[in-house]
């Protein structure tokens, strides 16, 4: 098999690691909200039965899991320079950005506030008593963590698209392998048949 561009090899290795972690995290993310971990308030239990919460956790969680499975398949196929894998990786990039931005929009616009309210529910069995510092720390943590997830969600697919758009990588998928003549100019290359 002809050599693969180094950028493609590195991207495939990172994609296999990323997708494996994404599959494990996706499975845990779908199961964990329904496990009785830590003290439970009536507000948190009620939240778990709301339609938008279930849609976000189960629906978008399953789509995210599917995206990570397609990333794994695409990365393995790209290591073998299969043309379908390049298309699958481009599809993964678009799908993962759409799913992640949708999930983050629901998270920031609705769920963070509901979780915040349920956590600090005063007088109705909330798990924490509200204090100014705790409320500020929790809100700040939600905003910073969401911003970090959004940054990674956009940066990773962008990196994949940049690698797949490189001329050497496109040529490798098309079966065009140009030997590197960096050490020898064309005129003095002993391996050049001209």
Image (cartoon, rainbow, N blue to C red):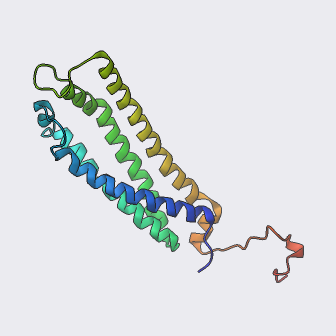
Instruction: Decide: is 153 above or below 168.
Output: above
Of the pair 24 and 168, the residue shown nearer to us: 24
Q: x, y percentage for residue 121?
A: 17, 23
* 154 sits left or right of 98 in the view: right
Residue at the location (13% across, 32% down)? Answer: 41
Image quarter hosting the C terminus: bottom right
Q: Residue furthest right?
A: 188
Instruction: Decide: is 12 above or below 111.
Output: below
Of the pair 101 and 30, the residue shown nearer to us: 30
- Residue 62 seen in render: no
Query: In which quadrant of the rendered view does residue 105 lie?
Result: top left
Instruction: Decide: is 33 above or below 133.
Output: below
Residue at the location (20% across, 21% down)? Answer: 129
Of the pair 140 and 66, the residue shown nearer to us: 140
Q: Residue furthest bottom?
A: 193
* 63 sits left or right of 91 in the view: left
- Residue 85 seen in render: yes
Q: x, y percentage for residue 193?
A: 82, 83
Q: x, y percentage for residue 18?
A: 43, 56
Residue at the location (49% across, 50% down)? Answer: 156
């Amino acid at each position: 098999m002809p050599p693969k561009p180094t950028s493609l090899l590195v991207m495939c290795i990172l994609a296999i690691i990323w997708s494996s972690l994404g599959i494990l995290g996706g499975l845990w993310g779908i199961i964990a909200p329904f496990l009785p971990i830590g003290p439970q308030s009536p507000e948190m239990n009620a939240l778990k039965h709301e339609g938008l919460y279930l849609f976000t956790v189960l629906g978008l969680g399953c789509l995210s899991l599917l995206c990570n499975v397609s990333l794994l398949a695409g990365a393995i196929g790209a290591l073998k320079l299969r043309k379908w894998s390049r298309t699958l990786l481009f599809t993964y990039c678009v799908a993962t950005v759409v799913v992640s931005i949708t999930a983050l929009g629901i998270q920031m616009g609705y769920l963070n506030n509901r979780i915040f309210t349920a956590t600090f529910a005063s007088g109705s069995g909330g798990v924490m008593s509200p204090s100014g510092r705790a409320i500020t720390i929790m809100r700040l943590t939600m905003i910073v963590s969401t911003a970090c997830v959004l940054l990674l969600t956009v940066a990773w697919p962008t990196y994949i698209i940049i690698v797949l758009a490189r001329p050497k990588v496109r040529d490798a998928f098309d079966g065009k392998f140009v030997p590197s003549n960096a050490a020898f100019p064309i005129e003095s290359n002993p391996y050049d048949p001209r």
